[in-house]
Image (spheres, rainbow, N blue to C red):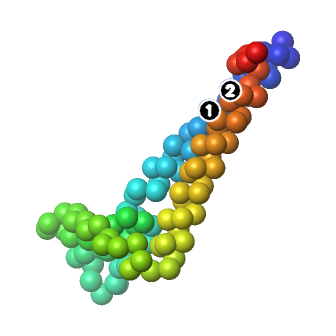
Amino acid sequence: MALVFRTVAQLAGVSLSLLGWVLSCLTNYLPHWKNLNLDLNEMENWTMGLWQTCVIQEEVGMQCKDFDSFLALPAELRVSRILMFLSNGLGFLGLLVSGFGLDCLGFG
């Protein structure tokens, strides 16, 4: 009984960490990292992501433009890109390494 509980707990932990990693990867591409709204102009909302800047207007909808150059970005966006790539890469490596320690997977 203890082995079954331990295996279920391990699978639940790996499943939750996989979900966290997938959501972290998804967050990388969303354009809603920074809002650049003025309270005076309620007709349009500006949002800035790691990869593009978007403007949301009531009559037109959402229009996005990619950043031209990595070096032309503000410093906080450059650091955020690097840290998110590092986070996603290390999270993937952590998932791979934790898979080898599962009781339900037998190697050798």
* Left/right of residue 93 with respect to residue 69 in the rendered view: right
Eyeballing the image, is 36 above or below 54? below
> Which of the labelled discs sits on residue 11, or is there none?
2
Q: Nearer the viewer, residue 62 or 77?
A: 77
Residue at the far bottom in the pictured view:
40
Indicate the amino acid at tag 1.
Ser
Q: Name which residue lies at 40% across and 58% down.
A: 30
Residue 97, x across and y down, in percent: 70, 36
**Residues marked 2 and 1 touching at CB (< 8 Å):** yes
Indicate the amino acid at tag 2.
Leu
* Left/right of residue 100 with respect to residue 43 in the rendered view: right
> Which of the labelled discs sits on residue 15, or is there none?
1
Q: Name which residue lies at 51% across and 76% down.
A: 76
* Left/right of residue 13 with respect to residue 67 in the rendered view: right
* Left/right of residue 43 with respect to residue 82 in the rendered view: left
Eyeballing the image, is 80 above or below 104? below
Residue at the far right in the pictured view:
2
Residue at the far top in the pictured view:
1
The Cα–Cα distance between marks 2 and 1, rounded to whole angstroms, is 6 Å
Residue 29, x across and y down, in percent: 40, 56
> Which of the labelled discs sits on residue 39, or is there none?
none
Residue 49, x across and y down, in percent: 40, 66
Instruction: Identify the image quadrant of residue 92.
Output: top right
Q: Name which residue lies at 49% across and 49% down.
A: 25
Residue 2, x across and y down, in percent: 85, 17
